[in-house]
Image: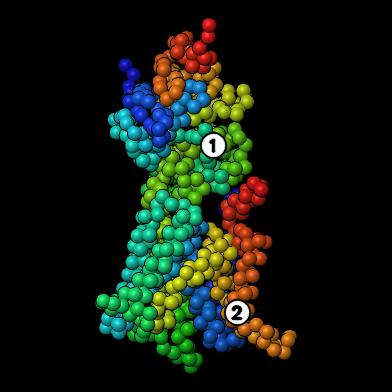
Amino acid sequence: MNTMTKQPASAKKVATFVASAIVLAVLPFIVGGTFGNSWVRTLDFALLYVMLALGLNIVVGFAGLLDLGFIAFYAVGAYTFGLLASPHFSLDMPFWITLPLGALFAAMFGVMLGTPVLKLKGDYLAIVTLGFGEIIRIFLNNLNAPVNLTNGPQGINLITPIEVAGFSFGKPHEFFGITFNGVYMYYYLFLALTVLVVIMAWRLQHSRIGRAWVAMREDDIAAAAMGINIRNIKLLAFALGALSGGVAGGLFASFQGFISPESFGLLESIMILAMVVLGGMGNIPGVILGAVVLTVVPEVLRDVIGPLQMATFGKMIIDPENARMLLFGLALVVMMLVRPEGMLPSKRRKAEFEDAKEGV
Amino acid sequence: MAEVLLKIDGIVKRFGGLVALSEVGLTINKGEIYGLIGPNGAGKTTLFNVLTGLYMPDEGSFTFNGQNLFRAKPHVVVGAGIARTFQNIRLFKEMTALENVMVGRHIRSKAGALGAVLRDPRTMAEERAIRDKAMELLAYVGITEVAHEFAKNLSYGHQRRLEIARALATEPKLLALDEPAAGMNPRETEELKALMEKIRASGVTVLLIEHDVKLMMGLCDRIAVLDYGKKIAEGVPEVVRRDPKVIEAYLGVAHE
């Protein structure tokens, strides 16, 4: 009986899988063909942010540790890649060394942040992680003297694009008579790695480790009394979250070809946290949605606001750049008031918010 | 001669200037139901927290099953074989009953992050074993029908049972229950009593804190009485019941 009820469900699963695979495969061509290559670039960034948000989701969503300095791990991954594959140190290491190394360093930094904050929770933890993020950025900004390690505010330039067996992702290529721009190549590369990160996050969530994280988030004393080593499980969350951040950072460095401390400010950390919270903390589909929406919507607003003002008022009333952030901020406020559990909350989170409401 | 499972001696616990436990010593033998009673604020729960690693004692000694557990971390204590429940139920509310018990299997399973991500056959087999054992324990305490409900939606009696199942999942040698009958009606208390007898019959030693003196007298093999952080009596229920110090602690001294 059980197998009979299962059969159609798995057929439906396969159909959904195939359909989404096809949509994801042709998406850049539809977007690029209709709106131009700059929008494919936006798609690439959306994928990077999905990886980042999923990484942060391990720390904030699964383990319940508020981290306001997550961008630091992105920076560590990016600088590892940048320093090892650019003229700055005259190094040109291949991506299969620089990318894993960046992820590894990021994970080490995760443990470095995690160790001193083991006893901290909530607001206090948030403030320390915020400080940590800023420390990393300020270090990157100032480590150009006495020895020039990071090239300071000028950043690292001419970072080698990812190259597989002589096939560079940085240059346009021609297949079947059609020229593919670099942004298309990177789209598929990012997509592949995003899928890996999604699988990693999903499997962790539904494992012994994932259960221990939820238990710790719900009641750390009871979790300890059930035999969970709180120290180890916390450090593991920091390390694995940072790992995804490091991978995204390395990809970012090779994609842009240029990195500077400016890209790793507090606002970026907050944006990624907003993606997690707005999408639905702890729920992987929600977090993916949050990351995509918060990457794409501001770009759409950028293109729409100017012409819209001209059409309705015949003149520019507010500078489009300001109006964009204004609307965006307003949308966040409204969203948090109307639907604090996020766009696609997990069943668990939803229950937590119901509890909170009943408490009022 | 009974075999000693747990032995503490000269345990002192201070909170700032307040001495919560002053040189408390007791031994629990394998296979018995051992009761801990005393008036409110006598230090029962403090002693419980010391025995389960949640509080670090300041002085004394603590051995369990031949292992030194003095100032050991909670997960070490659980690993050694002491599991507990809480006076004011502390379940993982937004996890299902089944998941709660599965968390209890954490210490007796090994899969790490790599295994979780790769899903190798060994991890999968372990995961199945965790689920099966958890289902078995839910059946053992008699709440299989609510396995997939969130813990917070369970009735009070079921929550108490779930907490016991979660503690049993750690395969304890000593199960420590902090006021398990609190807030229960007489029928539920009777059922709980039967459950405790069943647990003891399965070879697990039980340590019990309880306000209900009548329940304790009928259930426990031996009882220790705490008052103002000191042990004032220890022994079989009939003797402890007649101890003048115990009567004084519970009823106060008669004034002329």
Question: Residue A200, image x and y in percent?
Answer: 44, 62
Residue shown at the point (36%, 85%) measured from the top left: A158
User: Quarter of the image holding residue A249?
Assistant: bottom left
Report whether residue A217 is seen: yes
Q: Is residue A50 above or below residue B143?
A: below
B37 or B116, nearer to the observer: B37
Q: Residues within 10 Å of mark 2 (few under 14, many from 20)?
A: few
Instruction: Classify mark 2: helix, strand or loop.
Output: helix
Query: In this image, A157 relative to A356: left or right?
Result: left
Q: CA distance from mark 1 to mark 2?
A: 52 Å
Please tell me which residue is depicted at 53% across the width and 78% down the height of the picture. A43
> Total of numbered circles in the picture?
2
Q: Which residue is mark 1?
A: B89
Amino acid type of the residue that numbered disc 1 sits on in the rendered structure: Ile
Residue at the top extreme?
A: B256
Q: How is the image coloured?
A: rainbow
Q: Position of residue A309 (x, y in %)?
A: 69, 85
> Could you say where residue B195 lies in the image, as x and y percent from the top left?
52, 27
**What residue do we see at 43% from left, 59% from top?**
A128
The residue pinned by badge 2 equals A322
Q: Is residue B78 visible?
A: no
Q: What residue occupies the far bottom of the structure in this picture? A: A177
B184 lies above or below A219: above
* Disc 1 secondary structure class: loop
Chain containing mark 1: B
| Residue B215 marker | none
* Above or below, A39 relative to B164: below
Q: Amino acid at mark 2?
A: Asn
Q: Quadrant of residue A134?
A: bottom left
**Nearest the camera: A302 or A345?**
A302
